[in-house]
Image (tube, rainbow, N blue to C red):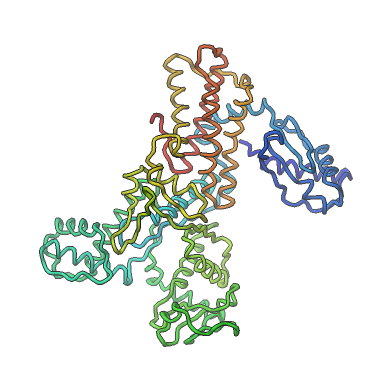
Amino acid sequence: MIRISQALKIETSKAIETAQSAGDLPAFEIPEISINRPKQADHGDYATPAAMQLARLARMKPDTIAEMIINHFPDTDYLRAIERTSGFINFRLADHWLQQQVEEILAAGSDFAKMDDYAGKRLQVECVSANPTGPITVGRVRGGVMGDTLARLHRAMGYDVEMEYYFNNAGKQMRLLGESLKARYLERLGQESDFPEDGYQGDYLYDIADQLIEEQGNSLADADWETFKDYAEASIFVMIKASLKRIGIEFDVFFNENSLYDDGSVWETLDALREKGLIYEALHPEQDEDLDERPDQEELDATQGEPATWIRMRQLRDVKKDCVVVKSTGEPTYRLPDTAYHINKLDRGFDLLINILGTDHIEEAKDVAAMVGALGYDSSKIKVPLHQFVTITEGGKTVRMSTRKGEFVTLDELVNDVGPNAVRYFMLARSPESHMDFDLELARKQSNENPVYYIQNAHVRCASIERVAAERGVFADDGDVSLLADPRELALIRKLLELPEIIDLAVDELAPHKIAFWAHEELARTFHPIYEEIRALYSDVPEDLAKARLKLYAAARIVIRRTLELMGMSAPDQM
C-alpha cells in the first residue's frame, strides 16, 4: 500500500539529489519537502512548493528549480504527468494505476490502511481519569473519545498501545462519598442521618444504598464511613467501566495514585528534585522583583500562614513565580504525584505518552513536563492534547452539570438518548481547542442532516448494492477494473486512497478530529453523489461494467468501514 504524499516527498528529494549530482542544482542540504493536495482539481492531484522552498538555498528562480526537479524526477508507475505552474510542481495520478488500487483495497480487506511506521514502539494513552465518586458524565467523555480514537489511529500506524485510567480513591472527596452513601443507607433503613455538607446528592447513591441493603441488610448501620467508601468505590467503578464500554472505550490498566505514596515514589521524587537544588522551604515564593508580592489564593491555601515547600519553577520554564509542591500541612499539590506518575510511566518503557486533559490543566501539564525533564527524563515523550469543555444543548437551552449536586447528564443517559455512534462522532467532530456544543436534536435525527447518519448510510448503500447483486446472481469476482474510466469513478478511488494519509496526519498532529472531518466532509460527500449517478445494476449498464463498479463499491465499503472503526463507530448494513 502506497501513501502517495509520502512517496512524492521521497521521489522529489531524490530528484533534487540527482539534479545536484548532475550540476543542474548547487549543493545544499535538502529541507523537509512539503506535499499538499491542491484545492482546485485543475492544479493536479498533489502539488509541492519545493521550488520556492529551495530558491534561497539554490539562489535560482523557482521556475528554473522546478524545471530541474521535473527533468530529474524518477520514473514512477503511479504518475501520468508532472507539471510546472508558477513555482509549484503539480502531480497527476495515472488512471491505470488508480484503477488497479481497487484490487489492492479488496486484497487488503480489513487490513487496509494498517501501517508499520512505528512497529516495535510502545504508546500509553491516559484519558478520562475521573475519581470514582459518581457515574461518568459527559464532561469526561470528550477526553475519553479523543484518547480512544488516538489509540486506534496509533495502532493503525504500528504502535503497541496500552490504555490507562488514573484515579485516586483517597482524600476529602472519597470521604464525602463514604459519608454520603452512609447517610443514604440509613435513610433507606428509615433511620436518622445527617447528610454531609457538600456531600454527593446524585440519585445513583440511592441505587447503591438499595443494593447494599439487599446484600447486607441493616448490619452496617454502625459501620464507619470507610466501609461505605469502599463499597461505593467498587460499585461506581463497575458503573464507569460498563458505561465506557458502551461507547467502545476499554482500559488495560487502572492505576491508583495512592500506590505512588505506598511505594514512596512521591517523596523519592521530592528528594531527587531537592538534590538538583530546585526545592526550598519558605512562606512566600521567590519571584521576579517587579511582581506584586501579594500571594494569590492558591498560595494562601497552600501555606496557611506557615512555610511551604516550593520548586524553583522559574529555573525550569519561562514563568515569573515559583510554585508550591508540598503545602504547609505536609500534603503534596498535584504537581508532585503527577511528576512521580509520569516517571513511573517512562520507567515502564513506553516510547510515547499521551495524556488527554482539559484546557484548565495547561499550566499543570507544563509544570509536570518541566519537573520530569529536570530529573533527567526525556519530557519530549510526553504529549498532552488539550480539549475545551462540553455543553449539552436541547431546544436552544443549556443543560447544566454538577456531579456533587446531582445535576448532571451521565454518559449512559446520553447513549440511551442518541446512541453510542452519535456520542463518539459529536465528541470527536470539532477541533479539541473549540468548545463543544452537543446538539441533542441534531444527534437524534435519522436523516442526512445528521453527519453520523450521512457517513453510516454510505456503508449501508455499499452493503445494499452487494446484497441486491447477489440476489440477482451478479458477482464481481471477474470484474475488470480497467473499465472504471469515468472521471467520477476515478475521483472516488482517489478519495478512498486518502485514508492512510489522513491517519498519518492525525497521528502526527495528535488531532483525532481530522478523521471525523474527513469522514463527513470528504469521504461521505464524495461518495453519495457518485453513488447516485454511477449505477451498477441498472438495465442499461453492460454486465462487464456492472461487475467493475461492484468492485469499486466493495472497495468503498472496506474504506468506509475502516474509517468508522477508527472512530469507534459501527458500520451498519441496514438502517
Image vertical order of residue 537 relative to residue 333, above or below: above
The image shows residue 230 at horizontal and vertical percentages of: 26, 64
Q: Position of residue 465 (x, y in %)?
A: 46, 22
Q: Please indicate whether residue 179 sits to the left or right of residue 415 in the image.
A: left
Residue 107 lies in what quarter of the image?
top right
Observer-nearest of 316 and 345: 316
Note whether 141 is above or below 302 in the view shown: above
Q: Tell which residue pokes out farthest to the front in this image.
A: 396
Q: Where is residue 473? Give x, y as percent.
A: 45, 14
Residue 376 position within the rendered picture, expressed as x and y whole percent measured from the top left: 58, 70
View extreme (right): residue: 23
Task: Judge left or right: residue 451 versus residue 70.
Answer: left
Q: Residue at x 54, y 36 (%)?
A: 523
The image shows residue 276, relative to residue 385, as above or below, that is: below
Q: Quadrant of the C terminus?
A: top left
- Give the residue displayed 47% in from the left and 60% down from the top: 357
Q: Residue at x 37, y 52 (%)?
A: 397
